[in-house]
């Protein structure tokens, strides 16, 4: 597959500044803390103030109301003030309108494709093109149970390093490094991982299919298009890929998406933080994955 053009980091910064200035982008302050569990330093972000919590509740209520009413695709057309630019001919880069992490990006298919369709080589080419322009963590929420809120296919990306540090799970993966598909014993949740080491889109796609097989997610034919047979999360960096089979979307009210398995959790309030502390992040993630 030919090399794909993608927006630069400067393009992301410039569009972020414009979107903030016109009110299209809403960034939320959080209080950050660390909970160490199983030798992994989990980053926990909590809504920083009462106003933010009230806004989060209103957004959750709005999301529920929107889901109950006739659905409108927010990516077609997208909000132009959030659009960073095209990635090749089949994807574009979009700022995530409501973000907890700075410069949270979406890699969206130009034409509608279902979120539960398997990722294709062109999807990984788009992600790879972005990773070539700036270092980041790509991730995918495969289905509602895995944390996806939109049925239009989109990968997500946040810049690295995260909060100035390596990803919390990176050391655990490095300690278990081997050729082929492997598990990291330090990570107590069900998963399969593989090293990429700057592989191209075709090799990344092949590895992705092997990882899905390893975690028991079988392809399902839907009108001639391969879909996932079960929910899963996917994490991708320049160096490695990790897949997690999912069983439930929330644990005692705490939502878990792909970022949780990278070692970054978000809680709304003290009560939810208490749940994470009581269970421990590893047990919480293990409960959200397939046992």
Image: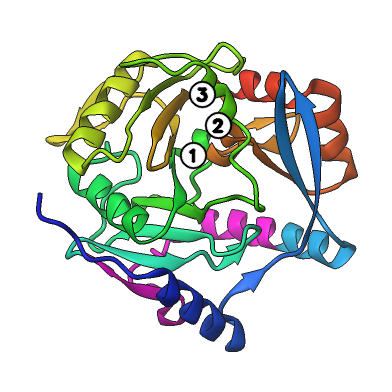
Q: Position of residue 73 (x, y in %)?
A: 38, 63
Relative height, residue 74 to residue 14 (above, below): above
Q: Residue at x 43, y 28 (%)?
A: 242
Q: Position of residue 238 (x, y in %)?
A: 38, 42
CA gap, disc 2 to disc 3? Answer: 5 Å
Q: Secondary structure at mark 3?
A: helix
CA gap, disc 2 to disc 1? Answer: 26 Å
Q: Position of residue 169 (x, y in %)?
A: 59, 30
Confirm whether the magenta stretch covers residue 79: yes
Relative height, residue 206 to residue 99 (above, below): above
Residue located beneath label 2 in the image: 170
Visible residue check, residue 142: no
Quarter of the image for residue 200 reads top left
Crowding near the residue tagged with mark 1, few <14, some 14–19, many ≥20 C-alpha atoms within 10 Å: some
Confirm whether the magenta stretch covers residue 6: no
Residue located beneath label 3 in the image: 173
Q: Position of residue 160 (x, y in %)?
A: 53, 52
Question: Which stretch is magenta?
Answer: 59-87
In this rendered view, identify the residue nearer to me: 55 or 87: 87
**Which of disc 3 and disc 1 is earlier in sequence?**
1
**Which of disc 1 and disc 2 is earlier in sequence?**
1
Pick out the residue farthest to the bottom: 22
| Viewer-nearest of discs 2 and 1 | 2
Q: Residue at x 41, y 59 (%)?
A: 134
Crowding near the residue tagged with mark 3, few <14, some 14–19, many ≥20 C-alpha atoms within 10 Å: many
Q: Residue 144: which numbered mark, if any?
A: 1
């Amino acid at each position: 597959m030919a090399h794909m053009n993608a927006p630069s980091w400067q393009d992301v910064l410039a569009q972020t500044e414009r979107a903030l200035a016109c009110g299209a982008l809403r960034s939320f302050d959080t209080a950050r803390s660390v909970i160490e569990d199983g030798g992994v330093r989990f980053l926990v972000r909590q809504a920083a103030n009462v106003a933010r919590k009230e806004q989060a509740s209103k957004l959750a209520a709005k999301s529920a109301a929107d889901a109950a009413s006739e659905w409108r695709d927010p990516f077609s057309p997208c909000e132009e003030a959030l659009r960073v630019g095209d990635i090749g001919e089949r994807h574009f880069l979009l700022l995530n309108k409501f973000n907890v992490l700075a410069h949270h990006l979406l890699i969206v298919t130009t034409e509608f494709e279902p979120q539960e369709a398997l990722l294709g080589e062109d999807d990984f080419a788009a992600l790879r093109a972005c990773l070539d322009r700036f270092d980041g963590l790509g991730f995918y929420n495969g289905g509602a149970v895995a944390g996806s809120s939109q049925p239009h296919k989109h990968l997500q990306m946040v810049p690295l390093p995260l909060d100035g540090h390596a990803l919390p799970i990176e050391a655990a993966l490095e300690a278990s490094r081997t050729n082929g598909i492997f598990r990291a014993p330090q990570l107590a949740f069900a998963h399969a991982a593989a090293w990429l080491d700057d592989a191209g889109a075709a090799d990344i796609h092949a590895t992705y299919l092997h990882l899905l097989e390893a975690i028991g997610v079988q392809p399902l034919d839907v009108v001639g298009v391969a879909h996932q047979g079960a929910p899963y999360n996917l994490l991708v960096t320049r160096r490695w890929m990790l897949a997690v089979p999912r069983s439930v979307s929330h644990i005692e009210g705490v939502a878990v998406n792909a970022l949780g398995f990278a070692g970054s959790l978000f809680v709304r309030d003290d009560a939810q933080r208490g749940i994470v502390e009581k269970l421990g992040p590893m047990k919480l993630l293990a409960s959200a994955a397939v046992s």
